[in-house]
Each structure stands twice: as C-alpha cells, then as structure tokens.
Image: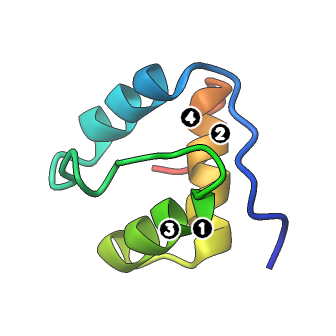
Amino acid sequence: MTNQLLILGAPWEEVKEMIKERNVYLTESDLRYEEGREWELLERLSAKMGRSIDEVKAYIESISHNRDIAS
C-alpha cells in the first residue's frame, strides 16, 4: 500500500461535501476525518465503497485537486 497520508488540494470540509454529492449513501460518520488518523477514514470508506484503500485514497485526492479521476 502507498503512503497513508492524504495529500489534499482543498480543505477537508470542501472535499467531504464533494464526496457526499457523488456518494449520497455516505454519512457524516463515514466521512469523519482527523489529521493523523487517515488510516481510519480510508478503512471505513474502503469497506463502505467496496474499493481498495489505495483506490479510495486516489479518489479522495483526485476530488480534492478537482481532477475527479474516479466516479
């Protein structure tokens, strides 16, 4: 697995809203993020989205940089 730290191109609150718009089944609890505890967020979303942790990380980072490579 790649580095667990998320590299965000926008504040988490903005990224979270963009993720929620595309994945309406995700809850506030699913998207709870604490700096330094990225692993927990990635594990939750991986299970909920049916994707690998690396895929979830790439998805979040792509949304945060407005590249939106995954949908």
Q: Residue at x 34, y 49 (%)?
A: 31
* Mark 1–mark 4 distance (CA, rounded to whole Å): 18 Å
Q: Are marks 4 and 2 in contact (CB under 8 Å)?
A: yes
Residue 61: x and y, percent?
66, 42
* Mark 4–mark 2 distance (CA, rounded to whole Å): 4 Å
**Dot 3: what SS?**
helix
Q: Nearer the viewer, residue 20 or 33?
A: 33
Q: Which residue is mark 4?
A: 63
**Dot 4: what SS?**
helix
Q: Which mark is residue 62?
A: 2
Q: Nearer the viewer, residue 6 or 66?
A: 6
Disc 1 residue crowd, few under 14, some 14–19, many 20+, Cα 10 Å: some
Q: Are marks 1 and 4 in contact (CB under 8 Å)?
A: no
Q: Which residue is mark 1?
A: 39
Label 1 amino acid?
Trp
Disc 3 residue crowd, few under 14, some 14–19, many 20+, Cα 10 Å: some
Q: Are marks 2 and 3 in contact (CB under 8 Å)?
A: no
Q: Is residue 17 above or below residue 70?
A: above
In the figure, is residue 48 to the left or right of 46? left
Q: Earlier in the sequence, mark 3 or mark 4?
A: 3
Q: Residue at x 48, y 74 (%)?
A: 43
Q: Earlier in the sequence, mark 1 or mark 4?
A: 1
* Mark 2–mark 3 distance (CA, rounded to whole Å): 19 Å
* Mark 2–mark 1 distance (CA, rounded to whole Å): 18 Å
Residue 71: x and y, percent?
45, 50
* Mark 3–mark 4 distance (CA, rounded to whole Å): 19 Å
Picture quadrant where residue 7 is located: top right
Label 2 amino acid?
Ser
Residue 33: x and y, percent?
46, 46
Q: Earlier in the sequence, mark 2 or mark 3?
A: 3
Q: Which residue is mark 3?
A: 40
